[in-house]
Image: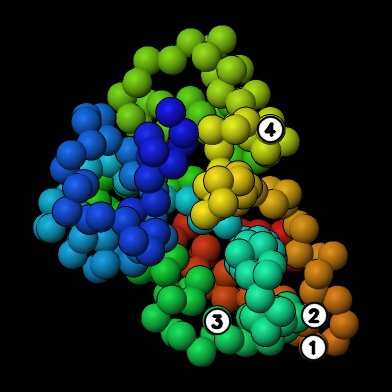
Amino acid sequence: MRLNERSPWIDYLGFPAEKLNDYPNPRVFKCHNSPQDLDNMLLRGSTKPRIIYAVRDPRDVAVSFYHHYLSANKNKEQERCELGPFCAGLAKTPAYTWETHVDSWLSLRDRYNMHVVQYEVLKSKTAAEINRIAQFLGVMITDQEVEDIVKKTDIEYMKQDTRVGLQDEDGSKTSVLNKGLVGEWEKHFVGPRLEKLAENMLTSANNIFKKHNLIEPPC
């Protein structure tokens, strides 16, 4: 079974929301929804479901999303743009900015049954974070199983796994994975204008991380 069939993106355009309850327990869904959108679609006031919320340095998020956008529009020359205008376009929709999304979810972490994963910590202390996630889910896990998860969730391993990725209309496989590196943004935010943009992103991130007692991203 493909990963996207076992754990679908429920905010993916065209996903049949009316079939959510058809998935067998334990059900695992992925999404980018805001708390309000997810509540309207799935939770409907319930605070019982376990939620794993992943948060990442917004500069790396921007680069990752930018590459995903380019990949999705690789055959549409008119949709291509540079990183600066791309980020500027995102900023025009305040309801979906990194700051709004992260702050809205973390402000509700005491209301929901939520475990927060910082991507940078997951990358640097993968085995420890896997154990924390397993504990949150109430799953008993052996050291050997942890090692197997570490191996099979490595970016390069997943790129070779045919069960990971999306299926194009022509039947070919498209990877949604880029590099998964921490600090990759430094290679892209080059030049006075982009460096200033990265500085502003860092300021916003630090404010959010301090507010919610998270580890601040490196400068």
Q: Nearer the viewer, mark 4 or mark 3?
A: 4
Quadrant in which residue 50 is drawn:
top left
Q: Nearer the viewer, mark 3 or mark 1?
A: 3
Residue 90 numbered tag: 3
Give coordinates of residue 18: x percent, y percent: 17, 54
Dot 1: within a 10 Å radius of its alpha carbon, few (fewer than 14), some, or many (20 or more) residues? few
Residue 160 numbered tag: 4
Quadrant in which residue 49 is drawn:
top left
In front here: 13 or 43?
13
In front here: 145 or 158?
158
Tag 2 and tag 1, C-beta contact below 8 Å: yes
Residue found at x 76% / y 57%: 183
Could you tell me the amino acid type at mark 1?
Arg
Gap in angstroms between the C-alphas marked 2 and 1: 6 Å
- Identify whether 166 is placed above or below 72: above
Q: Is 123 on the left-hand or right-hand side of 33?
A: right
Q: Which residue is mark 2?
A: 195
Q: Is 210 on the left-hand or right-hand side of 197?
A: left
Gap in angstroms between the C-alphas marked 4 and 1: 37 Å
Is residue 197 among the parts visible in the rendering? Answer: no
